[in-house]
Amino acid sequence: MKFRWKKILAALLPILVLLVAAAVFCFRPQHTRSDRLKDKCSTQYQIFHSSVDRDQDGIDDESDMLQGALEYINTRPKYKSQYYSGGYPNDGYGVCTDVAANACLAAGYDLMALVSADIAEDPKAYGIDEPDPNIDFRRVKNLRVYFKRHAVELTTDLTDCEAWQGGDIVIFTSHIGIVSDRRNAHGVPYVIHHSSPRQFRYEQDILEKRDDLVGHYRISE
């Protein structure tokens, strides 16, 4: 009897190993390569480069935004909505707005300071009675107002594929992300984002799958 069980276990072991390997592959957070592998669909569109280099690092704003978003998600942040006294999370956790904030920071735009200053200048535009710099820049509704006021507003027409460039900012009703330089078979780009604890990939083909797209912006021209 013991010998039979050993034979059964020996036969099942390779199957169990394959199942575990498949689960790890399918449900791991996507660890996007910093050196982008261009497919035919991605390379047929002219790549936009901003004329502005805010942080004067020799890399234009648009490229900095994309690279900053990729570097942030490569830290594999875990999803948790929490208040931080310093504004920016520093414990490996974050939410969707932190993807945008870190992308902007990489280009030389400190959203915490910028949003706080804009709210102080025109609190009615944001509908805020009691500003809190530590959290205001981490709310989608506030970023929607800020980018509409200070960024370059672009089309939300997904059929205009070349208008969508890696490093752009995309805003949904209650979500925000950074446009990827990877595209699907239709030429529509992926989105670099962080939406929930159940999200297993940080770079996803979601633009055509959502019906709540409300904004598309570029940090500079």
Image (tube, grey):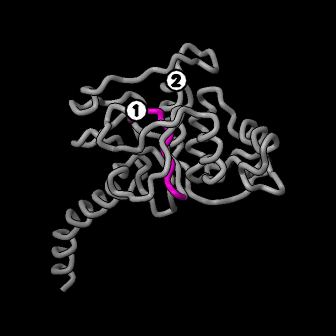
- Mark 2 is surrounded, within 10 Å at the Cα level, by few (under 14), some (14 to 19) or many (20 or more) other residues, namely few
Nearer-the-camera pick, 84 or 48: 48
Name the residue: 76% across, 51% down: 124
Give the secondary structure at mark 2. loop
Q: Residue 90: image x %, image y %?
A: 69, 46
Q: Find disc 1 in the rendering and name its residue.
A: 165
Nearer-the-camera pick, 9 or 62: 62
Q: Residue 118: image x %, image y %?
A: 75, 39
Name the residue: 26% across, 64% down: 19
Query: In screen coordinates, is 113 left or right of 55?
Result: right
- Residues at marks 2 and 1, CA–CA distance in whole angstroms: 12 Å
User: Which of the 4 image quadrants contains residue 21?
Assistant: bottom left
**Quadrant of the drawing holding the N terminus:** bottom left
Q: Which residues are magenta?
A: 164-173
Hey, what amino acid is under mark 2? Glu
Give the secondary structure at mark 1. loop
Which numbered disc flags the more N-terminal residue, 2 or 1? 1
- Mark 1 is surrounded, within 10 Å at the Cα level, by few (under 14), some (14 to 19) or many (20 or more) other residues, namely many
Name the residue: 55% across, 55% down: 78
Which secondary structure type mostly characterizes the magenta part of the structure? loop
Q: Find disc 2 in the rendering and name its residue.
A: 221
Hey, what amino acid is under mark 1? Gln
Q: Residue 131: image x %, image y %?
A: 81, 52
Q: Residue furthest bottom?
A: 1
Q: Residue 103: image x %, image y %?
A: 56, 35
Name the residue: 46% across, 63% down: 198
Residue 211: give its label. Answer: none
Q: Is residue 172 magenta?
A: yes
